Image: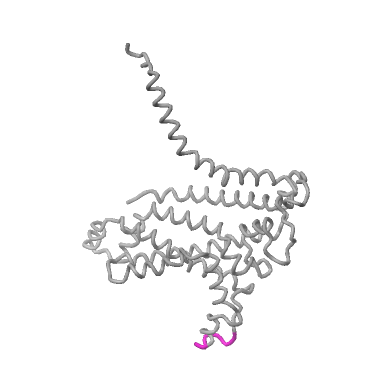
């Protein structure tokens, strides 16, 4: 009768159950890995925010309540590292995105050698960050680095510049980050530009639009969705870029290039001879949680602002 539910036969119920078990069996490995590698570390970190603990062999964790979080807000070096993180991220963004977009415009054209050029520019993206940092450390070395050597031979400078000193260290980090990541963003821009209809651009040319007008009024607006993704990736990578800073400067000199991620990392794994040899897991966890909250707030603000990029002309 109409309105009555159709009874499921035992054979059908068994078939549905087997199908569900198969589906869950495929999901189970991912669920286990997610729990072990993502969920458990987050829970562990949140737990030790309220404890003083130096790791195995240092005694039982000591409950200290909100002391670790209170210490974070009193920590001048940490808040300086927050400022350095924003300086580093902003410097990277304002350089890498225009350069990547300009390269994408040049190399998107079907010309001989463009494919090889794209591969060469993209190559640093797949290079190890540690190796890249070591290469730039040798290039920017104040005493026998190649950069100072060439600048002095060209009579641009009269004496070596300490590129990794307090005055220039942040600039060196930004240059290294731009060189290592510009190829990645170039590929994103090329993918977006190739989605722009050539008919629209040709119509604009017929109407008298020049090259710059076509870029500003047609290509950039139609890159809205991909530009939103590119900006998000650039912002998150700026907050998480730790290897570059660790290899080149270790946050120095005198914490001049210390960033949030490295500051928290050093309390879990001390990397400097001047630091205490015993980790401070509790305080490191508190630093990590506050840093994650700051990054989360920035992400939410960006998502609200970037909604207009979803509109395609």
Q: Which scheme is used to colour this image of the protein?
A: one colour
Q: Nearer the viewer, residue 169 or 307?
A: 169
What secondary structure characterizes most of the magenta part? loop
Q: What residue sits 69% from the left and 57% below the top?
A: 267
The image position of residue 276, as x and y in percent, is: 75, 61
* Residue in the foreground of this view, choosing between 249 and 95: 249
Q: Where is residue 125 in the image (x, y as percent from the top left)?
A: 46, 64
Going 64% across and 63% down the picture, which residue do you hit? 258
**Direction from residue 31 to residue 12 in the image, left or right:** left
Seen from this angle, which residue lies furthest top?
Answer: 1
The image quadrant that residue 4 belongs to is top left
Compared with residue 11, is residue 164 higher up or lower down, i.e. above or below?
Answer: below
Picture quarter with the N terminus? top left
Q: In this view, does 153 lie to the left or right of 10?
A: right
Check the image and report above or below for 281 versus 30.
below
Residue 205 percent coordinates (x, y): 24, 63
Bounds of the magenta span? 153-159
Residue that sits furthest to the left in the current view = 206
Numbered circles on residues, count: 0
Does residue 19 sit above or below 41 in this rendering? above
Residue 255's x, y, as percent? Answer: 67, 66
Taking the magenta stretch, the answer to whether it contains residue 154 is yes
Query: Which of the 4 quarters of the picture holds residue 266?
Result: bottom right
Is residue 139 in the magenta section?
Answer: no
Q: Residue at x 56, y 65 (%)?
A: 244
């Amino acid at each position: 009768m109409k309105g009555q539910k159709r009874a499921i036969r035992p054979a059908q119920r068994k078939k549905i159950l087997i199908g569900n078990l198969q589906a869950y069996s495929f999901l189970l490995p991912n669920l286990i890995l997610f729990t072990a590698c993502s969920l458990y570390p987050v829970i562990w970190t949140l737990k030790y925010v309220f404890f003083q603990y130096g790791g195995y062999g240092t005694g039982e964790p000591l409950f200290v309540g909100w002391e670790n979080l209170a210490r974070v807000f009193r920590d001048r070096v940490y808040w300086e590292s927050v400022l350095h993180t924003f300086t580093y991220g902003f410097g990277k963004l304002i350089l890498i995105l225009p350069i990547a977009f300009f390269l994408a415009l040049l190399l998107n054209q079907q010309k001989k050698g463009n494919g090889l050029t794209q591969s060469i520019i993209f190559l640093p993206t797949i290079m190890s960050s540690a190796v890249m940092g070591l290469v730039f450390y040798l290039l920017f070395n104040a005493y026998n680095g190649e950069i100072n050597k060439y600048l002095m031979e060209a009579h641009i400078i009269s004496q070596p510049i300490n590129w990794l000193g307090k005055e220039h260290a942040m600039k060196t980090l930004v240059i290294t980050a731009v060189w290592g990541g510009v190829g990645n963003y170039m590929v994103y821009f090329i993918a977006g530009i190739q989605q722009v209809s050539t008919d629209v651009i040709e119509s604009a040319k017929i109407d008298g639009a020049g090259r710059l007008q076509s870029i500003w009024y047609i290509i950039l607006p139609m890159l809205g969705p991909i530009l939103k993704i590119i900006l998000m990736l650039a912002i998150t990578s700026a907050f998480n870029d730790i290897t570059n800073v660790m290899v080149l400067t270790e946050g120095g000199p005198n914490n001049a290039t210390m960033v949030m991620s490295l500051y928290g990392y050093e309390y879990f794994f001390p990397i400097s001879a001047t630091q205490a040899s015993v980790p401070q897991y509790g305080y490191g966890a508190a630093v990590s949680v506050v840093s994650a909250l700051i990054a989360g707030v920035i992400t939410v603000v960006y998502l609200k602002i970037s909604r207009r990029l979803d509109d395609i002309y």
